[in-house]
Image: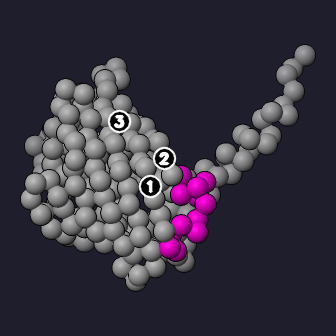
Amino acid sequence: MLIKNDFEVAAPVDRVWKFFDDIPHVAACLPGTELTKELGDERYEGRVAVRMGPVRLQFGGTAEITERDEAAKRVVIHASGAELRGRGQASMVVTATLAGAGRGTKVGVTQDLQLAGAAAQYGRGMISDVTAVLMRDFSANMAARIDAAERGETPARAASASPAGGFTLGLRAAMLALQRVFRRFFLPYRTSPG
């Protein structure tokens, strides 16, 4: 399943690119993500926990940066893991690209996600909506960390990752789904004034 998101950060491209050099800081921006071990050669072990209402999925696995193109401002990460209770597997190729957007930076994120087991039972729409919510949180956290670095502050890395979500993640994803349904079914029937 291919999921695309983009967002803007109010910092120049070079500053955002430099931030992407510190993978533990980047990972700390994504709710529910924790790097547990640096394996060398741009490989990491980690965990991801996502909670949607009563459903909690926890994956453990590895991630590797397979491409870092400074000229194109492009990073490609391959990640794979298994649900810690043996209820499925996930693999993902994440491609992040940076481009100037006025005085800031537009970050494009493409995720090629493959799920098997319990996580695969959720529909594409729900997974896309949850991903969109997580990307919004990621962009806000990243902007805050870049701003803190500009002020000379060193943001503390999270000691342990709390699951992304809970009730609010599910509610925010449901709101996105309702907006999508509203646009799909009601907007075509609007009549123009006249």
* Residue 19 can be seen in this image: no
In the image, which residues are magenta? 117-128
Q: Percent x, y for residue 155? A: 17, 54
Task: Please tell me whether mark 3 or mark 2 is closer to you in this view.
Answer: 2
Q: Percent x, y for residue 65? A: 21, 50
Please give left or right for residue 146 compared with residue 174 in the image: left
Give the residue drawn at x 54%, y 77%: 54
In the rendered structure, find residue 127 and report the number of the disc placed on it: none
Q: Does the magenta stretch include residue 137?
A: no
Crowding at dot 3, Cα within 10 Å, few <14 / some 14-19 / many 20+, comes out as many
Q: Percent x, y for residue 67? A: 22, 42
Q: Which amino acid type corresponds to the residue marked 1 in the rendered image?
A: Leu
Q: Which amino acid type corresponds to the residue marked 2 in the rendered image?
A: Ile
Q: What element carries label 3?
A: strand
Q: Percent x, y for residue 94? A: 35, 48
Q: Do the residues under discs 2 and 1 have CB atoms within 8 angstroms? A: yes
The residue to which callout 3 is attached is 107
The residue to which callout 1 is attached is 113
Give the residue drawn at x 26%, y 35%: 74
In three-dimensional space, the C-alpha distance between marks 3 and 2, rounded to whole angstroms, equals 14 Å
Please give left or right for residue 61 compared with residue 130 in the image: left
Determine the residue located farthest toward the bottom in the rendered image.
Answer: 85
* Residue 45 can be seen in this image: yes
Dot 1 or dot 3, earlier in sequence: 3
Q: What element carries label 2?
A: strand
Task: Please tell me whether mark 2 or mark 1 is closer to you in this view.
Answer: 1
Q: Quarter of the image for the C terminus: give it.
A: top right
The residue to which callout 2 is attached is 3
Crowding at dot 2, Cα within 10 Å, few <14 / some 14-19 / many 20+, comes out as some
Please name whichever residue, 191 or 42, is drawn nearer the observer in this view of the structure.
42
Q: In which quarter of the image is residue 147?
A: top left
